[in-house]
């Protein structure tokens, strides 16, 4: 089947709302004020430094301009070595449509400090913008752009679909955002959230998701995948696709439904294992609801690689990827 094969009919394809984009451009950013910055990992001693950051954008062109699933830009201060302004970095919005307070004034994100050793000479590597943002204190000003993104959104009629949300690390941000919108609608659909992190202590917004599962039994299902150690509730180390496999007896039925949409967000590379696992647990017809496979690459998922996405392993309009 070629990419242009018109015979592929995917049922249950959603329509999306029209959204604003690039209302604020990097050449003329607006100034927001940090109003909250708190650790949002399950443990304050987690291996990764991740913060929930809220920024007041009231009175700027960003106020009320975004919907759940979009991103905003941050322009770090200072100049590059070449004397040019730094490029903006994108951050997924973690707040629902209407923001943290519902009136469109407070935008938020889930921010991970990028800290590593330089590949070249093993000196300390600190990401420029993530560490700038994480260092900001309440009351500090920050230059913002956006909103950005028109594909990784809830459909125009959210109640018409079920959702499988798969996140690694800060990839949870747009799902916190979308879940906020679904809660406002009274959680009209079934949502299965799979959250993957290396250690249990790195789980993000863990208490909030547990509470949501208690508030909406049978509607919201919170599933975790811990990849570098086992826990009493998880005797095997699991990546997100491992959780998909472990819970296949429940999830396959949901995936077969033509109401279901899959959203994947987080670390670049996570998508291949998920696609391979979907190919393993679903029959070809059900798989074709989410993935169009060029026959030249064959149906043996063991032979697939990341470069095949999205051209020869092409997500349909019922599966959405945002990896970075
Ligand atoms: C759509 C989208 C949404 C995003 N959402 C979020 C979000 O919600 N939360 C979040 O935290 N981030 C998010 N990001 C990532 C974010 O935009 C930044 O890329 C991230 O914060 C790192 O930026 P930085 O300026 O700190 O790092 P930079 O200074 O830009 O450094 C990162 C770059 O340095 C290089 N590098 C990395 N490690 C090393 C090393 N050890 N040695 C040498 N070079 C190295 C890499 O080439 C890498 O591209 C998102 C990205 C996209 C595209």
Image (cartoon, helix red, strand yellow):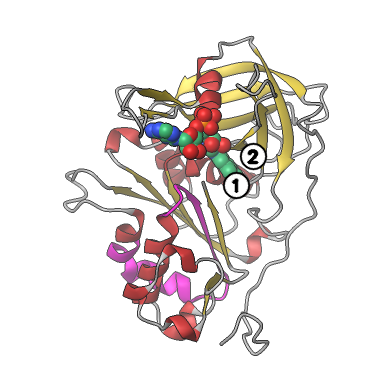
Q: Quadrant of the N terminus?
A: bottom right
**Magenta stretch contains residue 267:** yes
Res 251 quadrant in image: bottom left
Q: Vertically, is 98 above or below 255?
A: above
Label 2 belongs to which residue?
96
Does residue 237 appear to the left or right of 14 in the view shown? Answer: left
Instruction: Please say whether residue 110 is visible from this viewpoint.
Output: no
Residues rendered magenta in the picture:
244-269
Q: Position of residue 312 (x, y in %)?
A: 52, 74
Q: On residue 178, which mark appears? A: 1
Residue 99 at x, y percent in the picture: 68, 33
Task: Give the CA separation, mark 2 to mark 1.
Answer: 6 Å
Q: Residue farthest to the front?
A: 82
The percent position of residue 304, horizontal first and vertical second, equals 39, 72
Q: Residue at x 39, y 78 (%)?
A: 282
How packed mark 1 is, by other alpha carbons closer than 10 Å (few <14, some 14-19, many 20 or more), is many
Residue drawn at x 82%, y 37% is 23
Q: Earlier in the sequence, mark 2 or mark 1?
A: 2
């Amino acid at each position: 089947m070629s990419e242009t094969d018109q015979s592929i009919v995917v049922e249950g394809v959603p329509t999306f709302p029209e959204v604003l984009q690039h209302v604020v451009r990097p050449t003329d950013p607006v100034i927001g004020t940090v109003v909250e910055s708190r650790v949002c990992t399950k443990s304050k001693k987690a291996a990764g430094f991740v913060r929930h950051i809220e920024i007041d954008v009231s009175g700027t062109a960003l106020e009320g301009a975004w919907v759940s699933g979009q991103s905003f830009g941050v322009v770090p201060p200072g100049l590059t070595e070449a004397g040019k302004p730094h490029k903006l970095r994108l951050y997924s919005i973690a707040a629902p449509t209407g923001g943290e307070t519902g009136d469109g004034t407070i935008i938020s994100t889930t921010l991970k400090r990028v800290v590593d050793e330089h590949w070249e000479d093993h000196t300390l590597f600190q990401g420029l913008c993530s560490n700038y943002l994480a260092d900001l204190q309440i009351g500090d000003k920050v230059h913002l752009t956006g909103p950005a993104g028109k594909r990784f959104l809830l459909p125009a009629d959210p109640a018409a679909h079920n959702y499988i949300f798969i996140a690694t690390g800060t990839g949870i941000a747009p799902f916190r955002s979308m879940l906020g919108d679904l809660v406002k609608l009274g959680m009209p659909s079934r949502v299965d959230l799979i959250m993957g992190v290396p250690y249990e202590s790195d789980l993000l917004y863990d208490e909030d998701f547990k509470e949501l599962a208690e508030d909406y039994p049978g509607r919201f299902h919170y599933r975790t995948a811990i990849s570098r150690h086992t826990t009493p509730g998880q005797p095997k180390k699991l990546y997100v696709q491992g959780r998909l496999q472990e819970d296949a007896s429940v999830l396959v039925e949901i995936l077969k439904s033509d109401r279901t949409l899959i959203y994947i967000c987080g670390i670049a590379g996570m998508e291949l294992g998920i696609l391979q696992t979907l190919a393993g647990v679903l029959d070809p017809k059900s798989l074709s609801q989410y993935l169009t496979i060029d026959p030249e690459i064959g149906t043996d998922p063991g032979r697939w690689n990341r470069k095949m996405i999205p051209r020869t392993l092409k997500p349909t309009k019922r599966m959405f990827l945002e990896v970075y």
